[in-house]
Amino acid sequence: MVAKGVRFNSIKTWVGNFHTTEILEFRMKCPQCPQRFVVRTDPENCEYIYVSGAKRIFQTKDCTD
């Protein structure tokens, strides 16, 4: 599990453009195992796309307290 904001040594590759913003792809190795994963920037939605080797876990908390 990798938290948002954790720094990695990665291979950065230019994939394309969204208007004038570059779309970048990062290839990294998991810090706990030998698994490699690929993350791509999504400037249209201000998000990251997990291409392979990882999946997004999004948890929300109930704030009724």
Image: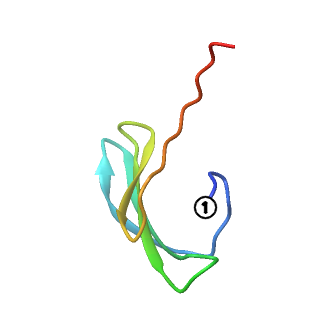
Against 19, is 51 above or below? below
Give the quadrant of the C terminus. top right
Against 6, is 4 above or below? above
Q: Could you say which is closer to the camera, residue 30 or residue 16?
A: 30
Which residue, as the protein is rendered here, is positioned at the far bottom? 34
For the point 36% across and 44% down, the residue is: 20
For the point 31% across and 52% down, the residue is: 17
Within the image, what quadrant is residue 30 found in?
bottom right
Q: Could you say which is closer to the camera, residue 24 or residue 60?
A: 60
Within the image, what quadrant is residue 54 found in?
bottom left
Q: Mark 1 falls on what kind of element?
A: loop
Q: How is the image coloured?
A: rainbow
2 on left or right of 26: right
For the point 49% across and 42% down, the residue is: 58
Circle 1 residues within 10 Å: few <14, some 14–19, many ≥20: few
Q: Amino acid at mark 1?
A: Val
> What is the x, y in percent for residue 59?
53, 39
> What is the x, y in percent for residue 2?
60, 61
For the point 38% across and 66% down, the residue is: 14
Within the image, what quadrant is residue 52 found in?
bottom left
Q: Could you say which is closer to the camera, residue 35 or residue 38?
A: 35
14 on left or right of 63: left
* Residue holding disc 1: 2
Which residue, as the protein is rendered here, is positioned at the far front? 65
